[in-house]
Image (spheres, coloured by chain):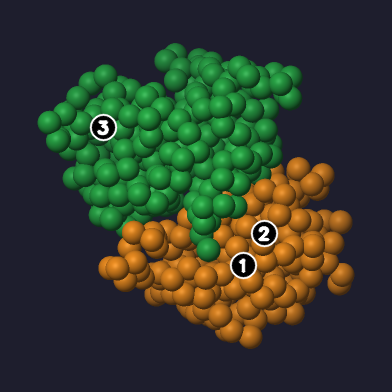
Chain colours: A green, B orange
Amino acid sequence: MLAKRIIPCLDIRDGQTVKGVNFVNIINVGDPVELGKLYAEQGADELVFLDITATHEGRKTFVELVKRIAQNLDIPFTVGGGISEIRDAEALLAAGADKISINSSAVRNPQLIDDLARNFGSQFVVVAIDAREAHNHWTVTVNGGRIPTDRELFSWAKEAESRGAGEILFTSMNHDGTKNGFANNELAKLSDSLTIPLIASGGAGSMEHFSDVFTLGKADAGLAASIFHFREIAIPDLKHYLRERGICVR
Amino acid sequence: MKIVIIKYNAGNIRSVDFALQRLGISALITDDHDEIRSADRVIFPGVGEASTTMNYLKMHKLDALICDLKQPVLGVCLGLQLMCTHSEEGDTTCLGIFPERVRKFVALPDDSASFKIPHMGWNSVSDLKTSLFRGISEADYFYFVHSYYATTGADTAATCNYLVPFSAALQRDNFYATQFHPEKSGATGAKILGNFINLKV
């Protein structure tokens, strides 16, 4: 049976992880490769590396980093941040990335999804959507949730799918950072309307939240950052918990 | 031992090379016919579209070359599909090493929330045959990402279930192939690559 995926997300700035302070077993907690390998050994099913560098030099550092990740990591990984053209994606593919994630650039230029899917295949293209709810309306936001757009979550997700996205990564800005659980109602509605896999993000605070996101939220994968980085939840414990509740995990 | 990875217009070739490097094995990535023919092991990886890839293989006369190889050959993902007889992707006549046909996954409307396409993620396999799976059990998981699958038949060396039972691995004579990505399947995948390299010839 296809297993539900657990995906830790690492924020990278200038080639170093931004979070991740509570690790005792690795020497350099700032090194994304060391941290990635540790997560892989613990049973993470995939990893997401998000480049939050703003400078051109930082971007070049990131491509070098992606190559080192590809050499050292034996599970699939997605990279995101600052991809706005085909040649950005090409450099990351050449460096060994399995998938790329696009967010604001896809909203600004939806044709980018078609172009990336045609050039590299749908399996390479994850469309990340940050959305915020107000008065029962889910507005798609860009620039890390700071700027609202005139797009609506459900129609944008369907459009991204029809343009060739291979996966949708939905983050609820209402739930992100709250640790009160994922946006299960919206996730279930999205999952029912999409034919491609759905990654849930935003709100993970306990193991029960993951169990809920796979049952109530009908998500194919659950993504989180701080609860893994700060060792609030260990991946082997989480897998054990989910398995005991009849959820198929690796 | 000389290990060759066939170089062609497909993605994912570097990943296989990196996985071999982690096993301490250095491989040659080439499309040179003499280099491929003289290798002890040949790996035919790939992510891409069937018809454009087959056209590329034909243009570079790699199609006949691959079929004539006598040493152990390992196809991965698209590699497996191209080693079958025919693919629905682009209505493509493939290499015909395995009699299987390649079909597109179709989810029934009722199944669409539980069976997303592509089949993406970690799945287990059953009915393991061949020494490729030495040391591996049906409790182990492999990483898959594909929208087309090979049917099952006499050459099926491992079966996976997703909407339908399909060939997760195939084997005939010196030809081996996996639909999953051993290079991305953690320690279990590394074992598959190691088993392939260590096949008794």
Label 1, secondary structure: give it: loop
Residue receiving disc 3: A131
Of the residues shown, which amino acid type is indicated by label 3?
Ala
Q: Are marks 2 and 1 on the same chain?
A: yes
Query: Where residue A50 sits: x, y (%)?
Result: 47, 28
Mark-to-mark CA distance, 2 and 1: 8 Å
Q: Chain of mark 3?
A: A
Residue receiving disc 1: B125
Of the residues shown, which amino acid type is indicated by label 1?
Val
Label placed on residue B143: none
In-image side of B102 versus A192 (left or right): right
Q: Residue at x 53, y 34 (%)?
A: A8
Q: Are marks 3 and 1 on the same chain?
A: no
Label 3, secondary structure: give it: strand
Q: Tell me, yes or no, whether the two marked residues, 2 and 1, touch with CB atoms within 8 Å.
A: yes
Examine the rendering and report whether any part of residue A185 can be seen. yes
Query: Where residue B116 sits: x, y (%)?
Result: 38, 59
Residue receiving disc 2: B140
Q: Quadrant of the N terminus of chain B?
A: bottom right
Examine the rendering and report whether any part of residue B9 can be seen. no
Q: Residues within 10 Å of mark 3 (few under 14, many from 20)?
A: many
Q: Residue at x 31, y 32 (%)?
A: A172
Which badge, 2 or 1, is on the more N-terminal residue? Answer: 1
Mark-to-mark CA distance, 3 and 1: 37 Å
Q: Chain of mark 2?
A: B
